[in-house]
Image (cartoon, rainbow, N blue to C red):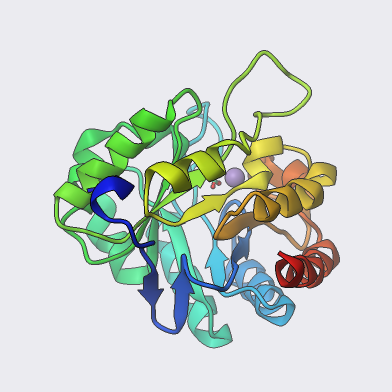
């Protein structure tokens, strides 16, 4: 079902007034984690003002260590839904377990599967039964084929609205947090009809590289981007402040992306 062989036309995912996989580049922006109502409200305002369409933010955070901040949970979902509604943005949030799919689907427009859960088959099966679109992140050690098979689980369950996300893979290089595999973008588009989104934030782990790799991703044909942005990145509650853009950087980037899209 994920293969282009049996589905030659691109899948366009329509969520309210936003089309993902169509002509327009879609930008999802926001913090790594939803922290407080004020934080997510202000960031939502800035995402909207910059021309972004979708507010990102994790309420359930997959942290490497069990003692790290684990997210604001259902309260975070509420805060984000409220901010999205107020500022006219769609919302995307990560769901980590099958039990939480229904509650996340109640609050968010799009559900995200994190890199660590790409092969959480029970989660994928459950996502096949919801009507919410799913952004499926590539596992940091997963091949293209494994990613497409993970997408297949969701599609086979009856949910046709899956987008693939390249978010960087683990390589021998340690300067960057991950290595954003730009080649994945055209390859996945060749093999599959599903929209492809790039995540230059987790793909690099360094704020100063996000702009360049965002542009490179669009030049490589990505249908959209998911980018971390924070009003006070140095004091963010996850370690991802170092890769989060400041609001003015985010806004400037979206202006440049618009110009880039016009020449492509
Ligand atoms: C995130 O989007 O904040 C996140 C945890 O991403 P990933 O699963 O790609 O690490
Ligand atoms: Mn993050």
- Percent across and percent down for residue 100 are 27, 52
Instruction: From the top left corner, tell me how far across and down residue 52 is, in percent.
Output: 64, 73
- The residue shown at (39%, 75%) is 15
Quarter of the rendered structure image containing ligand 2: top right
Give above or below for 79 relative to 56.
Answer: below
Q: Of all residues shown, which one is farthest toward the top?
A: 172
**Residue 71: x and y, percent?**
49, 49
Depth check, front residue: 206 or 61: 206
Q: Residue at x 18, y 44 (%)?
A: 125
Residue 207 appears anywhere in the view: yes
Q: Nearer the viewer, residue 219 or 164?
A: 219
Q: Quadrant of residue 208?
A: top right
Determine the residue positioned at 33% across, 61% down.
104
Q: Is 131 on the left-hand or right-hand side of 23?
A: left
Marks counted in the figure total 0
- From the viewer's side, name the closer residue of 194 and 59: 194
Q: Is residue 109 left or right of residue 220?
A: left
Question: Where does residue 58 sit, x and y in percent of width and height?
Answer: 50, 54
Quadrant where the C terminus sits is bottom right
Residue for point 50% across, 39% down: 187
Residue 261, quarter of the rendered image: bottom right
Residue 100 placement, left or right of 90? left
Would residue 244 be visible to someone looking at this image? no
């Amino acid at each position: 079902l994920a293969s282009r062989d049996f589905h030659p036309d691109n899948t366009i995912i329509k969520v309210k007034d936003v089309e993902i996989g169509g002509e327009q580049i879609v930008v999802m922006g926001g913090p790594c984690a939803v922290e407080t109502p004020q934080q997510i409200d202000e960031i939502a305002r800035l995402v909207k003002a910059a021309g972004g369409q979708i507010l990102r933010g994790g309420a359930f955070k997959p942290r490497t260590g069990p003692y790290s901040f684990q997210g604001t949970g259902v309260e975070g979902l509420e805060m984000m839904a409220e901010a999205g509604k107020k500022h006219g943005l769609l919302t995307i949030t990560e769901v980590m377990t099958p039990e939480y799919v229904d509650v996340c689907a109640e609050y968010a427009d799009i559900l995200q599967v994190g890199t660590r859960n790409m092969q959480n088959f029970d989660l994928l099966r459950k996502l096949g039964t919801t009507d919410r679109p799913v952004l499926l992140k590539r596992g940091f050690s997963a091949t293209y084929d494994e990613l497409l098979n993970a997408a297949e689980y969701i599609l086979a369950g009856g949910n046709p609205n899956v987008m693939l996300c390249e978010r960087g893979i683990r390589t021998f290089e340690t300067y960057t947090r991950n290595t954003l595999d730009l080649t994945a973008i055209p390859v996945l588009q060749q093999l599959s009809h599903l929209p492809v989104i790039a995540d230059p934030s987790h793909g690099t782990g360094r704020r100063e590289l996000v702009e360049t790799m965002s542009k490179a991703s669009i030049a490589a044909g990505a249908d959209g981007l998911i980018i971390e942005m924070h009003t006070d990145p140095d004091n963010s509650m996850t370690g991802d402040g170092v890769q989060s853009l400041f609001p003015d950087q985010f806004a400037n980037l979206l202006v440049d992306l618009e110009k880039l899209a016009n020449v492509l």
